[in-house]
Image (spheres, rainbow, N blue to C red):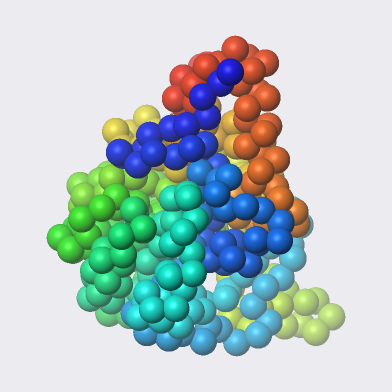
Amino acid sequence: MVDLSINIAGLQFKNPVATASGTFGNGEEFLDFVSPDRLGGIFVKAVTGENRDGNAYPRMAETPSGMLNSVGLQNKGVDFFCREIYPRIKHFTTNIIVNVSGSTIEEYVEVAEKINELDQIPAIELNISCPNVRQGGMAFGVVPSVSMKVTSEVRKVYKKVLMVKLSPNVTNICDSAQAVVDGGADVITLINTLLGMAIDAERQRPVLATITGGLSGPAIKPVALRMVYQVYKSVSVPIIGLGGIMNATDAIEFILAGASAVQVGTANFIDPTISIKIIDGIKNYMERHKISSVKDFVGALKI
C-alpha cells in the first residue's frame, strides 16, 4: 500500500493531483466524466470583483504542442459566485480553491475578503498575471515589489491558506517567488501561461482577436519544470507545479523537481478523465519504486 496523501501548508490533499483554473470550470461541468471527490483539489475558474464578459472572439487557437488562449477572465463576479455557484459545489469532498483575479489591489482584496467567509473554501490562488490598470497594464506578477504588495494586502484580510500563482514572463522567477513569500504567501503555484501569439499567413492577420495570448500545453513543460526546480531551491514554502502536464510521467517529473502537488490544465480539454489516470499512474510509479509516501520523493531529483 502507498500513501498518496500530502499535507500542503496545513491543507490535507487526498492525492497530489488537482485541476488548473480555467480548464475544469467549477467542477460541475465534468461530472459526467470525473467525480471531483477523487481529486486532490479543484482550482475553480477565475473570480473577479464584477462581471467580466471576457475578450472578443476568436480567443483560443491551437499551436504546435500547445494552445493559446485570451479568454479574459470571463466570469459573473464574486457576488454571483458566492450566491449561485458556491452552494452547488460546496458538497464536493475535495479542496475547492478559488482563483482570485483583479485589475487593482483593491479588487483583489475585495474578492479575497468575500471568499474568506465561505466555510468550504479552504484556500485561494492569487492570479498575479493580471494587468495592473494603475501601472499602464503591466502585470502584477512582473515586478517583485508589486507582487509583494498585492500579496501582503490580501494577506491582511484572508485568514486561510494563501496560494500565489506566479507569472513565467519574468527575468528571474526566484525573485518573484521570494517577493510573494515575503508578502505572506503560504504556497506558490507555478507556472501560469507564457505570452505568445499566432499568425494566419494567408489572411496576414493575428489568429487571436487580442493579438497575443497565454501559451499552455506540452510546449511549456520544460520551462515550467526548470522554474519549479529553481524555486524549490530558493524558497521554503510548498510548491504546486503546472505547465504541460499531459500524463502521470509528466506529473512525477514535477514532483521530483520539487512540487508537492500538480495541477492538470490543457490536458483536460483532450481527455476529461486524464486527472484520474494521472492519479493511478502516480500510484503505480510509487509501487514500482517502493515509495511509501508522496512526500518521500518531493524534490528527490538526483543531481
Residue 260 higher or lower than 49, as above or below: above
Q: Which residue extends farthest left? A: 156
The residue shown at (31%, 64%) is 118
Q: Quadrant of residue 120?
A: bottom left
x and y percentages locating residue 226 in the rendered image: 51, 38
285 with respect to 91 (left or right)? right
Residue 119 higher or lower than 199, as above or below: above
Q: Nearer the viewer, residue 286 or 127?
A: 286
x and y percentages locating residue 282 in the rendered image: 63, 30
Q: Which residue extends farthest top? A: 290
Q: Nearer the viewer, residue 299 or 92?
A: 92
The residue shown at (57%, 53%) is 36
x and y percentages locating residue 231 in the rendered image: 39, 38
Pick the quarter of the image with the N terminus. top right
Can residue 40 be seen in the rendering of this structure? yes
Q: Quadrant of residue 232?
A: top left
Q: Which residue extends farthest front? A: 91
Residue 27 higher or lower than 185, as above or below: below
The residue shown at (67%, 16%) is 288
x and y percentages locating residue 77 in the rendered image: 40, 81
Q: Nearer the viewer, residue 115 or 134?
A: 115
The total of numbered circles placed on residues is 0
Can residue 170 be seen in the rendering of this structure? no
The residue shown at (28%, 45%) is 186
243 with respect to 233 (left or right)? right
